[in-house]
Amino acid sequence: MRPTKLGPISPADASTTAFNAQTFNSTGAATAPTTTATADGLAHLVTLTAPSQNTLAGVTFTIVGTDSDGRAVSDAVVGPASGATVTSVKHFKTISTITPSATMGVLVVSVGITAVSLSRGIPLENSAAAAGMTVAITGTINYTVYETFVNVYENPSNTAATSITALAAKSATTTGNASVSATGVYLMTNSVTAGATYTVWLNQNSAGAP
C-alpha cells in the first residue's frame, strides 16, 4: 500500500455544551441538537448534563448519528439526575436527533462530549507484512492505537478491536507495528490539552500478499 498519513488532527477537549447548550428540551419527539457535528471531525463519547432540577433518571434518551467511519450509530442513555452527568457508551461524530422516552416538561439538559475520541479507521492490506506506523504529537495528549481483524469494509473499525501494546497509553511520539493480518487500525485519544495535535504516518509492504 502507499504510505498513508492521517492528520494533523487537533482533538477537542471535554465540553458539556459541544452539541447543545443547557437548553435541550423535547416533548418526546426526535429533536436535533443545535450543533450536529463535532468541531474536530472525530467521534466522541456524548454527555448529557442536567442543572439542579427534578431528576431525568426515569427518561431514556436515544441518540442517533454517525460514528468515526460515517456509519449509522445509535445509543440509548438513561437521563441524568439533578446536577449530574451521564455518558454514552458509543462514540458519535455527528448527532442527527435525540429522542427522550417521555416528555421533559420544563426540564433541560446540555449535550456535550468527553475528551475520549476515535479517529476514522485506516484499512490495511491483505499482506504477509505488518503495517508499521509512527504517531507524531505536539502538545500534551495521551493516545492508544487499536487494531482489528474484522472486515472493516462491512463493520465499524472499532469492532472487536484490541490495543497495540507498543502504542498503548502513549504521550510522546512513538513508533510501533500492527499485527500481521490485522485489517485496520484507528487511534483513540484518551486525554488531551487544548491545541495538542497528532499525526499518524503508516506504511505497509505489500510483498507476500496472496
Image (cartoon, helix red, strand yellow):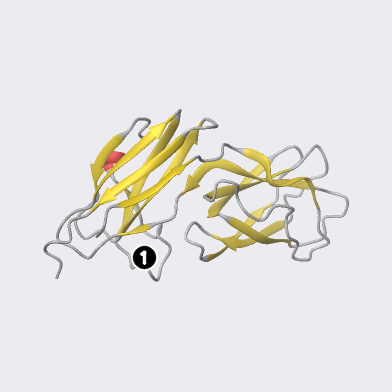
Which quadrant of the figure has residue 124? bottom left
Q: Nearer the viewer, residue 91 or 40?
A: 40
Q: Residue furthest right?
A: 106
**Quadrant location, the C terminus:** bottom left
- Where residue 180 sits in the image (x, y, percent)? 19, 56
- Quarter of the figure with the N terminus: bottom left
On the question of residue 168 being in view, the answer is no
The part of the image, by quadrant, that contains residue 18 is: top right
Q: Position of residue 91 (x, y in %)?
A: 53, 53
**In the visual, does 90 lie left or right of 198?**
right
Q: Position of residue 193 (x, y in %)?
A: 52, 30
Residue for point 69% across, 58% down: 60
Residue at 29% x, 45% y is: 164
Q: Which sits in the foreground, 118 or 90?
A: 118
Q: Provide residue 50's location: percent of width, then percent of height.
A: 75, 42
Q: How many badges with numbers are in the image?
A: 1
Q: Kindly identify the residue that appears in the image at 60 percent across and 62 percent down.
A: 65
Relative placement, left or right, of 11 versus 17 is: left
Quick check: 39 above or below 28?
above
Q: Residue at x 27, y 53 (%)?
A: 3
Mark 1 secondary-structure assignment: loop
Residue marked by disc 1:
152
Instruction: State the residue lying farthest toward the front.
Output: 2
Q: Is residue 116 left or right of residue 95?
A: left
**Residue 161 falls in which quadrant of the image?**
bottom left
Say whether residue 163 is visible: yes
Judge by depth and name the residue closer to the eye, 209 or 117: 209
Tag 1: amino acid: Val
